[in-house]
Image (cartoon, rainbow, N blue to C red):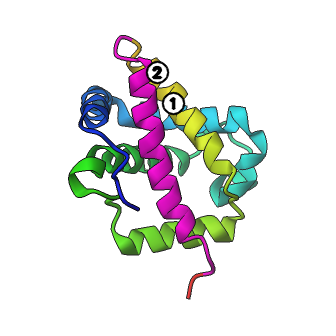
Amino acid sequence: MEGKGFTEEQEALVVKSWNEMKKNSQELGLKFFKKILEIAPAAQQLFSFLKDSTVPLEENPKLKPHAMAVFVMTCESAVQLRKAGKVTVRESNLKRLGATHFKAGVAAEHFEVTKLALLETIKEAVPEMWSPAMKNAWEEAHDQLAEAIKSEMKPSD
């Protein structure tokens, strides 16, 4: 997963916005997940800890840590993309992510939902910074991470 499509300008936009969002990553992670579920309510069935949950999302004890971890990993991966030249999630984590997504029944098109949710979350988090260029930078970063995960979406060994 080469980061060749990720320019210095894109990197600067991603880094600047992530630096601003980092301090609110728990809250933003939750917003990100709520947006995913607003866009695609059926996605709730893809998460073992949400599947049969009867409590409101905000009260689900496993959602906040999971949402924050996913949001932080996505953003940290984006920040490192140009410097590393590729998605920097450790290979073992990438394999685990791929296997987990595969096992949960995640399909390639589900990543379009996460992209939309991510972009909306960032736009709301840093409205004064938001621009078409920033949107493109985050789209590129998301797509490269999504491709890296999709490439590992197969049954675990």
The residue that appears at 52% across and 54% down in the rendered structure is 146
The mark found on residue 123 in the picture is 2
Q: Residues within 10 Å of mark 2 (few under 14, many from 20)?
A: some
Residue 53 visible within the image: no
Vertical position of residue 30 compared to residue 70: above or below? above
Whether residue 141 is in magenta: the answer is yes
Image location (x, y in percent) of residue 27:
43, 31
Q: Nearer the viewer, residue 93 or 3?
A: 3
Q: Quadrant of the C terminus?
A: bottom right
Left or right, residue 14 beside residue 58:
left
- Amino acid type of the residue tagged 2 in the rendering: Lys
Measure how far apart labels 2 and 1 are at the Cα level. Answer: 6 Å
Q: Quadrant of the N terminus?
A: bottom left
Q: Residue furthest top?
A: 128
Q: Which image quarter: residue 56?
A: top right
* Callout 2–callout 1 Cβ contact below 8 Å: yes
Q: How many marks?
A: 2
The residue that appears at 35% across and 62% down in the rendered structure is 89
Q: Which residue is mark 1?
A: 119
Whether residue 36 is in magenta: the answer is no
Vertical position of residue 152 compared to residue 57: above or below? below
Region of the chain picked out in magenta, as a range: 128-155
